[in-house]
Image (tube, helix red, strand yellow):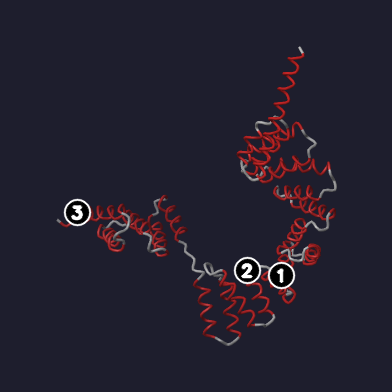
Amino acid sequence: MKKIIFIFFCLVVLKAEAQASALVIADSLYTIGNFTAAINQYSKVNDQQAQLQIARAYNLVRNYDKAMVQYENYIENNPQDQIANFELGKLYGKTKKYTKAKEVFQKLVAKNLENPEYYYYLADTFASLNAETESIALYKKAIAIDSTHLRSIFEVAKYHVKLQDRDSVVKYADKGLRFYENDVSIINLKALALFNNDEFKASIPLFEKMVALGEKQPYIFERLGNAYFSLNNLEKAKENYKTSLFYDALNPSPKVLFNLGNVFWEEKQLDSAAVYFQEAIDVQVVLFDKEYQALARIYSEKKDFKNALKYYKLAHEEDPSNVIYFYQVCFVADRYYKDPKVKLSYYEQLLENYKGQRAYFIEFAQRRISELKEEIHTASE
């Protein structure tokens, strides 16, 4: 009997040692980011901590469904574990399961009324559920607990920017900047609030600070240009408008081009002003080919070939390089006109203008030309 007990004890010890060894290996793999291998090792360890680590590893490799299952199973046995609940709540939010996230964070807030992070994430969840009033109240609660909670400060300040409440934006922005003076997002909100309130002189240093901090976005230079222009500093306005265009070279703003034209106008450089005004027009060329084609299709279905032909022609005028549009013109003209000579002229134009284009359209046009010529010849006999 003693021998059996001894053997059993040895087996228990060996199993414990094996699990401990597997756990050490799994933790090492997890630490260096080899998460799939870590999951395999954790699976050999039959305890709650390993299950939690598996959930975390699945989350990190973005297998969110498996991560949620692991978290949920773990929390079922450890409902008081705030860390695991917090991680699961954030994962629900990440995967847009906002109602579940709300339930988790509401429970966490009830357990710990003094944790600003719980209020912040609960506020985020309400915001995602379009409950703006509740979300702002919760962001403010997070700030009341921690006056340096920058993410909550940003959200509240952004909300007041939308309301055009200049004083509240400045109040919350200053609160955040006292803690971290180089927070670009909050500097931006304060700058916008002042700029939108026509406080151009006060907004300029803030926009310029953003540039100094590495934010070189076209809209920043555009607003700097507008601010300097409003203060009649034409040289600075010109400089910033040109910089805005430089950083938006692939998609130049017609507003910036127009404003730059106004600067040259003020400087009595009329030829330069005309150039920028013309460029502002050129970049706003709008094509309506798809809209015309859609209208043409509707009229075709209604058997109103007169209007269908009109809109297919308009679509072709918008984009004359598109063989499909002219093919559609020919196709509808074929049904609208009775005179085969008129029909023929359309198909001959298709062949002449679109040589080397898609074989189907060319072959169709050639076949119809032959048929129409035969029809014309027969009619003349």
Q: Is residue 52 above or below residue 142?
A: above
User: Which comes before the other along the chain, label 3 or label 1?
Assistant: 1
**Of the residues tagged 3 and 1, which is closer to the observer?**
1
Horizontally, residue 157 falls left or right of residue 212, namely: right
**Of residues 9 and 89, the one drawn nearer to the viewer in this rendering:** 9
Specify the quadrant of the image occupied by residue 353. bottom left
Horizontally, residue 289 falls left or right of residue 260, namely: left
What residue do we see at 49% from left, 72% from top?
282
**Of residues 93 and 337, the one drawn nearer to the viewer in this rendering:** 93
User: Residue 314: x, y in percent?
Assistant: 41, 63
What residue do we see at 67% from left, 46% from top?
94
User: Residue 304: x, y in percent?
Assistant: 40, 54
Distance of label 2 from label 1 (alpha carbons): 20 Å
Q: Which residue is mark 1?
A: 196
User: Which comes before the other along the chain, label 2 or label 3?
Assistant: 2
Tag 3: residue type?
A: Glu
Q: Is residue 235 above or below residue 198?
A: below
In the image, which disc is placed on residue 118? none
**Of the residues tagged 2 and 3, which is closer to the observer?**
2
In the image, which disc is placed on residue 374? 3
User: Residue 229: x, y in percent?
Assistant: 66, 79
Tag 2: residue type?
A: Lys
What residue do we see at 62% from left, 76% from top?
240
Q: Which residue is mark 2?
A: 216
Distance of label 2 from label 3 (alpha carbons): 67 Å
User: Residue 320: x, y in percent?
Assistant: 38, 64
Tag 1: residue type?
A: Asn
For label 1, the SS is helix
What residue do we see at 67% from left, 44% from top?
31
Do tag 2 and tag 1 residues touch (Cβ < 8 Å)? no
Distance of label 3 from label 1 (alpha carbons): 72 Å
Q: Residues within 10 Å of mark 3 (few under 14, many from 20)?
A: few
